[in-house]
Image (cartoon, helix red, strand yellow):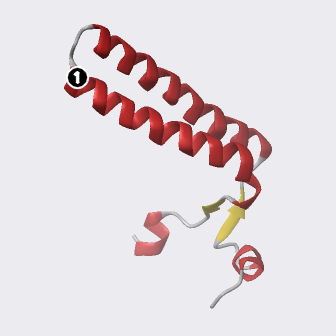
Amino acid sequence: MVSYEELLQRQIIKKIEKVEKDRYVSFHFDNYNIDFNSAKLFLEQKNFKYAVIAGYYAVLNVTLWYFAKNFIENIIVPYLSIMEKLKC
């Protein structure tokens, strides 16, 4: 199996830059707030179907935010684009 260091050296993956990390973390937190507020609004309107859907996405985004906030050093981004992989 290929190691993390070897993938970095071959430039198949790269570390996320500091600014990009902050954007990644805030993106999930902002989406969590939007989905959570939507779920509350749907509950007030007694629209339970959409409240459950928005609540599901709120939980998903708060989980992604938590992992991004606490484990961002281990997150890597694929370096090669799909077009390069497909040789287009």
Q: Amino acid at mark 1?
A: Phe
Residue name at image x 42 percent, y 25 percent: 35
Residue name at image x 40 percent, y 73 percent: 86
Q: Which residue extends farthest bottom? A: 1
Image-based side of 28 in relation to 52, left or right: right
Tell me where residue 47 appears, x and y as whole percent: 21, 17
Q: Secondary structure at mark 1?
A: helix
Tell me where residue 21 appears, x and y as whole percent: 71, 43
In the rendered view, would you say 2 is above or below 40? below
In the rendered view, would you say 35 is above or below 61? above
Q: Quadrant of the C terminus?
A: bottom left
In the rendered view, would you say 63 is above or below 37? below
Figure label count: 1
Residue name at image x 70 percent, y 72 percent: 11
In the rendered view, would you say 87 is above or below 66? below
Residue name at image x 74 percent, y 73 percent: 8
Circle 1 packing at 10 Å, graded few (<14), some (14-19), many (20+), is few
Please tell me which residue lies in front, 2 or 71: 71
Q: Which residue extends farthest top? A: 45
Residue matched to label 1: 48
Q: Quadrant of the N terminus?
A: bottom right
Image-based side of 7 in relation to 63, left or right: right
Image quadrant assignment for residue 55? top left
Tell me where residue 76 appears, x and y as whole percent: 66, 61
